[in-house]
Amino acid sequence: MKTNIKVTETIKTVAVCVLLVSLVCLCTAYLFGFEKNKSPEFTDAKLASLREQSSKSVYSRYFDSYYALPYFIGVRSSDGKSRGMFSGYEQMNTLYADVSDYLSVLFGASGECTEVDGKQAQLLWNNAKSGDCIYIGYRTELPKNIICSMSFPDKMSDSISGEYISEMIIYPTGIPAIITSSDIYGNVTKTELYAFSAICRNPHGQYFVCKSDYTPKSVSDIYFNQERIFSYNMKDAVSFEFASSSDYLSSSGKLSDTTIIVDSITSKSAAFTYSLAGNPSAEASRIVGVFSLNFEKAASYKDSDGSVTYLEEGQNVKISSSGVVTYNVTGASGGVSLPSISGGASKDGYSPFDYVGASLILLSKLDICDSAKPYLSGIYKSGDSVTVTFGYAYDNLTLTDSEGADFIRFEFSSGMLISSSLRPVSAEGELKYKYIPQNRELEIHILMSEETGVLRPIYPINASGDVTYAEWQAFSAAVGGDGK
Amino acid sequence: MSWNNLKFFAIAVLLCLNVIFAVCVIHQYNTENYYSTEEIDSVSEILAKSKIYVSKNIMRAKKVTVPVYKRSFSQDALFEIAGEICRGFTLSQSDEIITAESGSEKWTFFYDYSFSYSRDDCPAPSVLLESSVLTELITTTDYETTFNRLAGEFLGIKRINQNAANSGARKTSVMLYRLFSSEQDGIYIAMFRQLIDGKATSNTFYLAYDGEKIISGEGTFAFLLPDTSQTADNTDLINLLFNEKRNLDAKTPGGDYKVQLISSVVYEYDVYYDTDGVCYYVPVCNLIYSDGTMHTYNLVDGKER
């Protein structure tokens, strides 16, 4: 009997315990179950960011440094010593990659760029150029993030802001960390490691100061000092100066302070011929297809000047006998959507990245560029439309035609390509110009003569924008140069 | 009250509480995982105003929660897998690509998750697609079996899944998506989708097959499989259906709707890459109509693709 009672009591105790444990489990499941209190690790904001980055990732395959390569990079010391370089893709690329160490710090996550107004900006600019500095001049004003992504897609972070800049001076800041070292002979050397900042500007007079809280601590860090910036390998380097002031430059729509070459350039001269690339008419099917027209079904007619126009409902493509390709949307059913160009998802809004990226994809598909490389010459917004333009450069020297028109133009509206014109250019010949006088504006252009088919180096000579030619070397006659 | 009676009382109270909480938990589970009949009826009624009808089985099925997967890029890991796929090939790597060559065969693995393969200088599938007169074939089960096996063997799917670089990662496979044939050349060009955990992804690639062997290939395929799972707030199916109705209403301003039946709902992954090379697999939901029309919605933000 006693045993039965004991067993019953034990069962009751066990039952109470089991029920208690069960209750706790159920309470826990009720309160915390089904992950209802767990905040998601992957959020809408992350998705939005990924969408943006993913489209850039698609575009980055088409990015190439020559689209936004500086026309000039130079280093100067406070005592007036200077070295600069402006031609040669390979050399400029290497130099630009070296200088990008500074840009990755200043434009990266630890950097901050703020606009500076008026006299303070001018003062900062003057101070920067009067000391040890690196000067970078771009051909045109472009968003900072596009310049960097185009040039260093693997090096730069995604957080670069998009201020339009055309020139930049990188200069040392703060008190340097001093590193002392001695060699086996007991010679002691001191290395001053400066932190650095940059001041950027554009032709509209906007100035931006880019700073970072980064401080170099050892010689293996990124640091600024005179020895380091003068150690860059610059083939055929020229001396240069910052022009103090010039009415001519102001009247030509540029800032009154730019870079001029001090040296006469005699080591390299240009002798070109140029020709319109191949015969795009033979590739009409491919070109028409790039603009989403069905070559087999599109109607076509030939003009008296030899150009052929391919028509489809709402859009047409015209290919001239000289290779100029023109695309126009004429009706609501026409246009090429950005997602169909990039293969990406449609978005609520498109950024300059999307328009530039889509333009690069189209350029790549059209495959009309030869030895003359296209460079990004502008991104313009007007109302609902965004226009992306490209010029040409040969060995990093800008090519300019007699009319000054854009060589390549893509116009977008509401995420659709609505018009486009492309003039293919093929430059041939060796870069061998003989003589460019001292103290001329640095932006050396090469004028293409439609009549003679010869590219000739030019430089401006007066305030009204007149230009003159550099002298030619005698040998250039073989490829069409005429010596003057 | 004696100690014995107190135990009885405690058991009774605890039993009651257990029953109450069990009911609450079951109710909560059902609420979170299934739509109630009232909800289904109410949603059906609203959708019917735009003549959208949804199969009841879709609404009654358990709600699906699909995680986001991700994988960081590693050049070394890709090199290891490239070596596994291209056994006997000479491998080399640069800042942008890994190449593997053996005789007339050449593989190129790009760091943006794309690849290309050619043999005997055969043109890439994209070139063949543009230049050849092709017929699209209906992908029958026979074709699916044959070509899925071919692609699986060609890419070495088993070895990719078992490779140490993919240890602990989700499993991959391939699915024939479209098939073209050129009667003139006797070449088949097959388009495949990469599957992760049995769900299709937006990674696609093409293989050209001459009847005996794969002669060229190109496309996007994640050889580095996702190894990290992230929780995400999946948009409710009902909200997706409401988004679908809203989109249809916007496209049909006159209210001239035609009757449409959503016959199935399929979950897949869209693949995104961030600038650091991390690959994300974000779930999407395909609403498939009985006439074959498909509208795809992102499960994280509920927006149409």
Image (cartoon, rainbow, N blue to C red):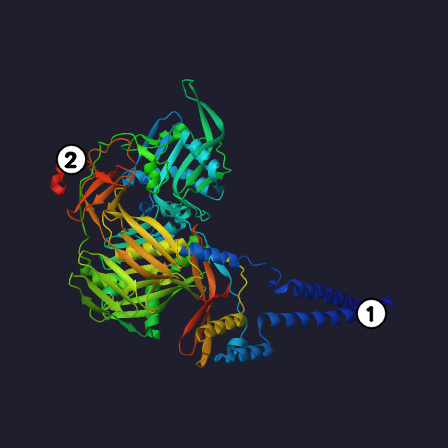
Q: Residue furthest right?
A: B1
Q: Which residue is mark 2?
A: A473
Residue A208 in the image: state x and y as whole percent.
45, 41
Relative placement, left or right, of B120 versus B9 is left
Q: Seen in the image, is A149 located left or right of residue A293?
A: right
Residue A284 placement: quadrant:
bottom left
**Residue A339, percent across and down?**
38, 62
Q: Are marks 1 and 2 on the same chain?
A: yes
| C-alpha span from label 1 to label 2 | 121 Å
Q: Is residue B135 left or right of residue A148?
A: left
Question: In the rendered image, which quarter contains the N terminus of chain B?
Answer: bottom right
> Farthest residue toward the left?
A478
Q: Name the disc covering residue A187, or none.
A: none
Kindly identify which numbered label has been placed on residue A5: 1
Q: Quadrant of residue B130?
A: bottom left
Circle 1 chain: A
Q: Pick the residue in front: B216 or A125.
A: A125
User: What type is the residue that disc 2 sits on?
Assistant: Gln
For disc 2, the chain is: A
